[in-house]
Image (spheres, rainbow, N blue to C red):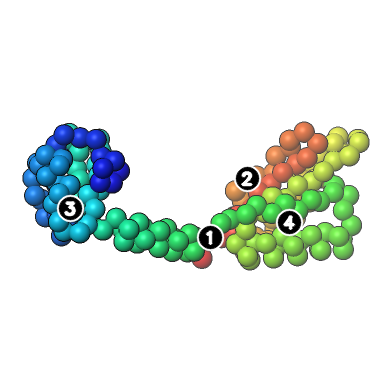
Amino acid sequence: MVNEEIRAKEVRLVGPEGEQIGIKPFREALQMAYDANLDLVNVAPQAKPPVCRIMDYGKFRYEQQKKEKEARKNQKTVDIKEVWFRANIDEHDFQTKLRNVLKFLREGDKVKCSVRFRGREIAHADIGKKVLDRVLVEANELCIVERVPKLEGRSMIMILAPKST
């Protein structure tokens, strides 16, 4: 809350340089802010009495937005990429999908490796486990296992995360 939006009879006032001024009536604090050609900003409304600071609110908001924008620019979002395998996958198809897994891990994304079972293939879940174990052996130097291969419905799922450098 800023200036007239503040609803308190008394406020603990902090000056423009951060110095403690003390407890003042709201009108007097507002007049001091206007005299300094600044705004009265409520920085701690839950305190008794509320803490208000004399500052340039427009400049404060601008600086805050600049910091938030910089923080957003510096953060890396981690996506989960999914690669589907089949229990009876051919060698060339396996190598192609493995290349994608390695590429995603190098880019810093997590990879969800899934083996889909169709029909009676589900009776041979051990074959799907061997496929996922082979992916893990091939990608071992680039990743850590975040979730071990586990059967969920008609799919066996394993999640790999890139090793932090």
Quadrant housing residue 148: top right
Q: Name the residue under label 4.
A: 135
- Residue 143 in view: no
Residue furthest right as drawn? 119
Q: Residues within 10 Å of mark 1 (few under 14, many from 20)?
A: few
Q: Mark 1 points at which residue?
A: 76
Q: Mark 2 points at which residue?
A: 147
Residue 140 drawn at (x, y percent) = 65, 60
Q: Which residue is drawn at 13% across and 52% down?
A: 32
Q: Disc 3 versus disc 1: distance between alpha carbons?
A: 41 Å
Label 3 is placed on what type of residue? Ala
Q: Name the residue under label 3.
A: 33
Q: Nearer the viewer, mark 3 or mark 2?
A: 3
Label 1 is placed on what type of residue? Lys
Residue 59 drawn at (x, y percent) = 31, 61
Q: Disc 1 versus disc 4: distance between alpha carbons?
A: 26 Å
Q: Residues within 10 Å of mark 4 (few under 14, many from 20)?
A: many
Q: Are marks 3 and 4 in contact (CB under 8 Å)?
A: no
**In-front residue for pair 4/21:** 4
Residue 141 drawn at (x, y percent) = 62, 64
Q: Which residue is drawn at 24% across and 53% down?
A: 39
Dot placed on the residue nearer the N-terminal end, 1 or 4: 1
Q: Disc 1 versus disc 2: distance between alpha carbons?
A: 22 Å
Label 4 is placed on what type of residue? Val
Q: Do the residues labelled 2 and 4 touch (CB within 8 Å)?
A: no
In the visual, does 153 lie left or right of 25? right
Q: Disc 3 versus disc 4: distance between alpha carbons?
A: 66 Å
Q: Which of marks 3 and 4 is in front?
A: 3
Q: Residue at x 69, y 46 (%)?
A: 158
Label 2 is placed on what type of residue? Arg
